[in-house]
Image (cartoon, rainbow, N blue to C red):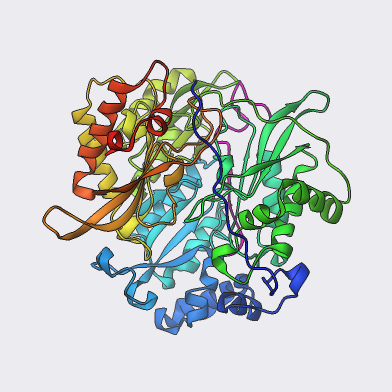
Amino acid sequence: MTSVVSGTRTLRPPRTGRSNGQWAVDGREPLNPNESFKAEDNGLNVRERIETIYAHAGFDAIPSDDLHGRFRWWGLYTQRKQGIDGGQTASLEPHELEDRFFMLRVRTDGQVLSPAHLRVIGGISSDFARESADISDRQNIQFHWVAIENVPEIWRRLEAVGLQTTEACGDTPRGFVGSPVAGVAANEIIDPTPVIREITSRWLGDTELSNLPRKFKTAITGHPSLDVVHEINDISLVGVVHPELGPGYDLWVGGALSTAPRLAERLGVFVSEADAPDVWHGVISIFRDYGYRRMRTKARLKFLLAEWGTEKFREVLETEYLGRPLPDGPAPQPAQGPGDHVGVHAQKDGRFYVGAAPVVGRVSGTILSALGDLVERVGGDGVRLTAHQKLVVLGVPEERVDELVAGLEDLGLTAAPSPFRRTTMACTGIEYCKLALVDTKDTAAAVIAELEQRLAGVELDTPISLHVNGCPNSCARIQTADIGLKGLITTNDAGENVPGFQVHLGGGLASPERDEAGLGRTVRGLKITASDLADYVERLTRRFLAQRVAGESFASWAHRVEDEELA
């Protein structure tokens, strides 16, 4: 294992001497239009209007504050109108960019998707979403092409099997990321399932927590691979063993990426399973009460943590919200094994789990329905999604593993992916996203196919992650990838404006290749056109393999060499 440059960028706190919209300090007077529409009507209340008015009267009946605001509380965003190129993203108004159809996000919160779940999700995709379905890097399923008239029926089908879109978007506690192998892995430290279930059952949809300054992201794992990207969540509970108190969790807060990336920090406390729900509620309540609401660009929890520091944050949590001190606790051990869980692995009960990779998370209704049938046929328990746009089939009898692997391959879900198919992620991109400047999913898929041919036979004994993002907001975690690509419009050799990418190099989260997370570096002036992307990644990969020292990871090499080696 090699060391790499790590750390967190310094964030500029909000200005002092004026109200920053902290409820506990400044009162609740709204300071911007977003805060005003939230104060006027809780976002959760829009569901009744969707079901009783908009689903019958149609898209044109939806007022702006509901359409562009409160709909998010139920997982709905208008999608991008087709045919608008990335050069127009910044020049058009939101209503000019949007279509009359929606993206709808289904949260899974780390739960097992049974064959029945998979068939319901697949059926919704086929019946109402033109076969669209993407596995996100937060274990959600995202549909596109959803018409408002069909939303009540979609909710009815989801909720009949225990799934939901409640607070999947908006200034709310977003979908939880949980270990995909919770409760089954032989080397698990602690099963996070009871904690996730307790928190979501008590507080999901609670109006006391449905008006936060911004989104609030949660990750909980008890697996030693550190498989929930805990360093970039607002709150993470990471499995550890206290020398006296036994298994429990280490508490991390204040992580997030976007245009001002900051890695989460440990508070240094040990959280027992019994205390975990109250600790989660304490942290999110701090965010609600003390988070900055004046400017949305400074409203994430990371800005409050940057201002307070971990010592004050812990003090406020213990004294104002818990009413008791928490014991000091150990840090997690270095990551053991890949966190994507791809491949065939023995469970603690003698059965097996099998991790499989679609191409950059893209599946379909037909695939998901067929996956449900396949899992049922081989006697598996179900499927969990991962934080890497992958899926894991759980509870497979040993004698049916080969049948499952072959069946997955027939569906385009491989348990033995090529290196770049395994490590490439992509956000939604210009196909559907109103913020995007470039295509991502198809571009990434084409690059993977090219690299599989060009690098066939090339030995990669250390993974090189490739993350493709359509705009600066880093939904695909570009700053924590070996090669992170931020979409932009650039100029080619002929002087034409074309889709391209700014390159981030050498980032990463805790893994067997690196003990600590770190943000990637940029090379001044380095921009790659989308058409040259496969050439660039191949060139960089071959250069790394030729120049690295023994045991060196791509991230270490990228931070070591001169800029010209990275061009």
The foreground one among 223 and 114 is: 223
Relative side of 441 to 308, left or right: left
* 514 shown above or below 522: above
Residue at 50% x, 34% y is 5
Residue shown at 32% from the left, 75% from the top: 92
Please tell me how many numbered marks the rendered image carries. 0
Q: Quadrant of the C terminus?
A: top left
Left or right of residue 153, residue 460 in this image: left
Does residue 438 appear left or right of residue 64 in this picture? left
Judge whether residue 21 can be spotted in this image: yes
Q: Name the residue at 63% across, 69% down.
A: 293
Q: Is residue 202 above or below residue 414?
A: below
Q: Nearer the viewer, residue 118 or 304?
A: 304
Picture layout, residue 95 above or below residue 227 = below
Q: Position of residue 159 (x, y in %)?
A: 56, 57
Side of 240 where 437 appears, left or right: left
Q: Position of residue 561 (x, y in %)?
A: 36, 31
- Look at the image and tell me whether residue 191 can be seen: no
Residue located farthest toward the top when viewing the structure as drawn: 550
What's the residue at 60%, 33% (across, down)? Answer: 182
Q: Position of residue 18 (x, y in %)?
A: 69, 74
Q: Position of residue 312 (x, y in %)?
A: 77, 51
Image vertical order of residue 21 relative to residue 484, above or below: below
Q: Nearer the viewer, residue 512 or 376?
A: 512
Q: Is residue 208 magenta?
A: no
The quadrant where residue 12 appears: bottom right
Q: Which residues are magenta?
A: 171-192
Residue closest to the eye, 292 or 103: 292
Q: Main secondary structure of the magenta part?
A: loop
Q: Residue furthest left?
A: 494
